[in-house]
Image: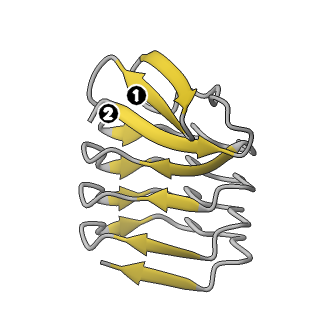
Amino acid sequence: NRLIVFTSINGKVIDNSPANALVVSNTYANGKGILIFDGPIDYIREDSYCNNSLLSSIVIPNSVTMIKGGAFSNCCNLKCVTIPNSVTEIEENAFEGYSSLTSISIPESVTEIGNEAFRDCSSLKSIHQF
């Protein structure tokens, strides 16, 4: 609940501090990056990954309950986001302009999806609920 695992298209760390806690370690090795925070992460903050073209995948920790507005907007190379069962809300424009996304799985725990959360997701063909 204190770390986010990611991959990037260039095999390097990402610069953003994408949560509501202080980053204490940001490393990339053996094909994956790990952001470690000083405390548990309970939401992904507004615009935290916005316009990040280096990000290709991300695994959100099980402690996260909310993905704030614009969190992953315009991440043109992001192909995979793992949303845990702990998430109950996806705010407006959270995945807007996510052009490489073809499908997404949303856990049944999500009870609220904001306006235009998937606006301009031109490749999105299916949304699955699990």
What is the secondary structure assignment of the residue under circle 2?
A: loop
Q: Are marks 1 and 2 in contact (CB under 8 Å)?
A: yes
Q: Amino acid at mark 1?
A: Asn
The N terminus lies in quadrant:
top left
Q: Position of residue 8 (x, y in %)?
A: 65, 42
Is 71 or 12 nearer to us in this picture?
12
How far apart are the two marked residues, 1 and 2, measured between alpha carbons? 6 Å
Q: Position of residue 35 (x, y in %)?
A: 46, 28
Name which quarter of the figure residue 61 lies in.
top left
Q: Amino acid at mark 2?
A: Ile
The C terminus lies in quadrant:
bottom left
Considering only order in the chain, which callout, 2 or 1, is on the residue closer to the N terminus?
1
Is 115 or 81 nearer to us in this picture?
81
Q: Residue beneath label 2, please?
A: 41
Is 86 or 4 nearer to us in this picture?
4
Q: Is residue 16 above or below residue 96?
A: above
Q: Is residue 60 above or below residue 121?
A: above
Q: Which residue shows up at 50% across the image and 58% down it?
A: 81
Where residue 11 is drawn, which disc sits there?
none
Q: Which residue shows up at 72% across the image and 53% down it?
A: 74
Q: Is residue 25 left or right of residue 129?
A: right
Q: Residue beneath label 1, please?
A: 20
Q: Which residue shows up at 75% across the image and 45% down it?
A: 53
Q: Residues within 10 Å of mark 1 (few under 14, many from 20)?
A: some
Name which quarter of the figure residue 38 lies in.
top left
Q: Is residue 73 left or right of residue 3?
A: right
